Amino acid sequence: MTVDRNRESKASTSSTVYLQLALGMTAFGSATPVSKIVTAAVPVFVASALRVTIGALVLAPFALRNWRQVKGFGRREWLLVAFISLFGMFGFSALMLYGMSMISGVVGAIVMSTTPAVTAAASMLFMGDRPTWRKLTAVTLAVGGVLILHLGRQGSGGGSGGGGNGGLLLGSGLVFGAVCCETAYTLLGKKMSESVDPVLVAFLAAVISIPVFLPFALWQWGSFAVAETSGRVWAALLWYGAGTLALGTWLWYSGLAKAEGAVAAGFMGLMPVSALVLSYLLLDEPFRWLHLLGFGTVFVGVLLMSWEHARMSRRAWQSGST
């Protein structure tokens, strides 16, 4: 009887962890189409300031439980938090929103899906991570997927959500800049999370970014038609802060704390899937085979990265158990 109860408890825990990982990645993926809705009516820096403020408020109850860790911060820790705030909050929000105002949600989703490959490339370049054929292939596929979009656009001369090839290139470039900021956020956050709760780090980064956004938000406030903003936009803005920033962070890291690295890596593929599917559902954008080809190319790279992370996790576990 005791054994059966233990099995049931373990299965229930695993299900909860899997659900947290899946929902966390789905929330992260929703940022792409939701940011497109937000930029249709809200100035970029106003939206960014509201996003980090909402995110900080939602994260506060979870972060404050580990507030004692802040007492041990030295110069290094505060510098890391400052850089995480600069890249992960300020840079990511501004570049993402400006970029998504120029391109379609589907194109943005495909560019954002290169995040795992870009993170792997940066880790190899700056963190001394060892290159492998899987990592290099994933980076190549990510670049190839984005190139398919641009070459196909030039060949067809059309598409949704951009002002010609120039708008597509600039918008995609800005979103790719957001990918680079997300990469910096991930790598710096990984280093910081070795000794500090990652939810606390996200909360501190959000709080620090609020006064940075404030002057720009006040400058743009005059062009924000508050009374004319629809409920759909307000709901999207609320989710952009509470969902993609706060809830996604809490769910992902809660699951990550209780899951094996190999298991967590497998859920990375849900982020680009979520971004693509929600772009079709929320933005009512037309389906194009070119989108599927570009996304499929990048997604194979995401799966390769998940495979590589799982392989490395198993190797680390095996070496640690011997």
Image (tube, rainbow, N blue to C red):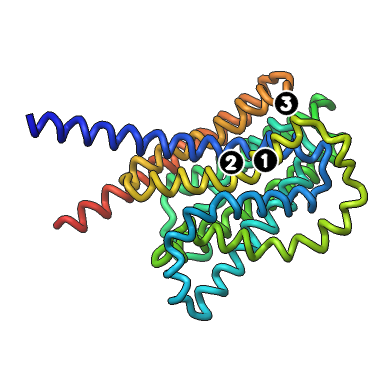
Q: Where 31 falls versus 84 (above or below)?
A: above
The residue singled out by tag 3 in the image is 283
Seen at 82% across and 63% down, the residue is 215
Q: Amino acid at mark 2?
A: Gly
Q: Residue furthest left?
A: 1
Position above or below: 136 against 208 = above
Marks 2 and 1 sit apart, C-alpha to C-alpha, by 8 Å
Q: In what element is the residue under mark 2?
A: helix
Q: Quadrant of the C terminus?
A: bottom left
Between marks 3 and 2 in the image, the one whose residue lies nearer the viewer: 2
* Residue 196 locus on image (x, y percent): 43, 65
At x 73%, y 65%, the residue is 212
Q: Residue 243: x percent and y percent?
A: 58, 41
Q: Residue at x 46, y 43 (%)?
A: 251
Label 1: state its secondary structure: helix
Dot 3: element? helix
Point out the tag, 2 or 1, that comes first from the N-terminus: 1
- How crowded pointer 2 is (Cα within 10 Å; few <14, some 14-19, many 20+) is rated as many
Pinpoint residue 135: horizontal percent, then vertical percent: 46, 48
Q: CA distance from mark 3 to mark 2?
A: 18 Å
In the picture, measured across the screen, residue 66 lies left or right of residue 9, that is: right
CB-based contact (under 8 Å), mark 3 and mark 2: no
Q: Earlier in the sequence, mark 3 or mark 1?
A: 1
- Residue type at mark 3 is Leu
Work out how far the residue at label 3 is from the one at label 1, CA to CA, in angstroms: 17 Å
- Give the residue pinned by disc 1: 238
The mark that comes first in sequence, 3 or 2, is: 2
The residue labelled by disc 2 is 243
